[in-house]
Amino acid sequence: MGAQFAAPGGEFLLGTDHLGRDLLSRVLYGGRSSLVLGFAAAGVSMLVGVPLGLASGYLGGRIDEGVMRLLDMLLSIPSLLLALLIVALLGSSLLNAVLAIAVVYTPRIARVVRSSTLAVKQEEFIKAAEARGESRVYICFGEILPNILSPIIVEGSIRIGFAILIGASLSFLGLGTQPPTPDWGYMISIARDHLWSTTWYWLWPSLWLGLTVFGCNLLGDGLQDVLDPQSHVSKRP
């Protein structure tokens, strides 16, 4: 307690918080929580969204209509508001925050997969697989999916950054990672009460949160250039 709001220096490289805890350790540990939440939420949304998009795009008809209308209902609700509603119903915890963010981004993943599936299912190799009598499951996962991995990978990498941002927002409101586990969003929330006492308390978690989300977006752009040659060529002077 004697080291409250210590300035960045030799003993505490990033300073300390209102309880005298080392901010460097808490920022690093909080980053683990934020990254786990972002990757887990993006992974769950892809596990659910990819099969939904494949089935909707390939089967069409009433299945496509029913799935798309359900997803449109979810898309009509703002992302953060939908996540808040789900966490409020399930309770505040890291697991529930992951599930809530996964529900938010599953419709977006599914729509990307559906649009790519609609373009690929008209190709000759799909017609040949149907003529051989292959099952619909094999055609979706053995023929279509390998040919639409590029947009899925790019979309997933971008969604990781957005998932981290919404997870930090939930923690900021007290509905995500629960104390005493550090989290960037929760650290920023606590720092609001000490804005006039110190600047580094809110600066470091805010800085690393912004850099992480920015890095995920850059990763998505880089993957798009590598996986989509036409996009890469179009950017050349």
Image (cartoon, rainbow, N blue to C red):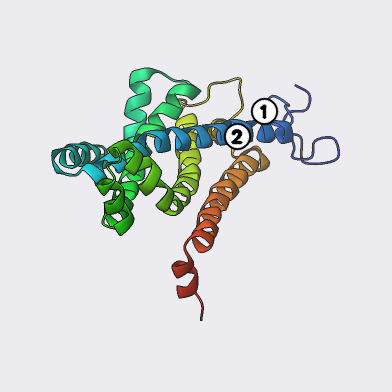
Q: Is residue 66 left or right of residue 159?
A: left
Q: Residue at x 54, y 61 (%)?
A: 226
Sequence-wise, which precedes: disc 2 or disc 1? 1
Task: Say which amino acid is labelled 1.
Answer: His
Secondary element type, mark 2: helix
Viewer-closest of 65 and 130? 130
Q: Give neighbour class at mark 2: few <14, some 14-19, many 20+ (Cα, 10 Å).
A: some
> Residue 216 placed where, x, y %?
54, 49
Q: Residue furthest right?
A: 10
Task: Say which amino acid is labelled 2.
Answer: His
> Residue 88 placed where, x, y %?
35, 22
Q: Residue at x 47, y 52 (%)?
A: 154
Q: How many marks?
A: 2
Image position of 3 with respect to 54: above or below: above
> Residue 237 placed where, x, y %?
51, 81
- Residue named by callout 2: 194
Q: Residue at x 55, y 56 (%)?
A: 218
Q: Residue furthest bottom?
A: 237
Whether residue 169 is visible: no
- The answer to which quarter of the image holds residue 6 is top right
Whether residue 203 is visible: yes
Secondary element type, mark 1: loop
Q: Is residue 67 left or right of residue 100?
A: left
Asked if labels 1 and 2 touch by Cβ distance under 8 angstroms, the answer is yes
- Residue named by callout 1: 18
Q: Residue furthest left?
A: 62
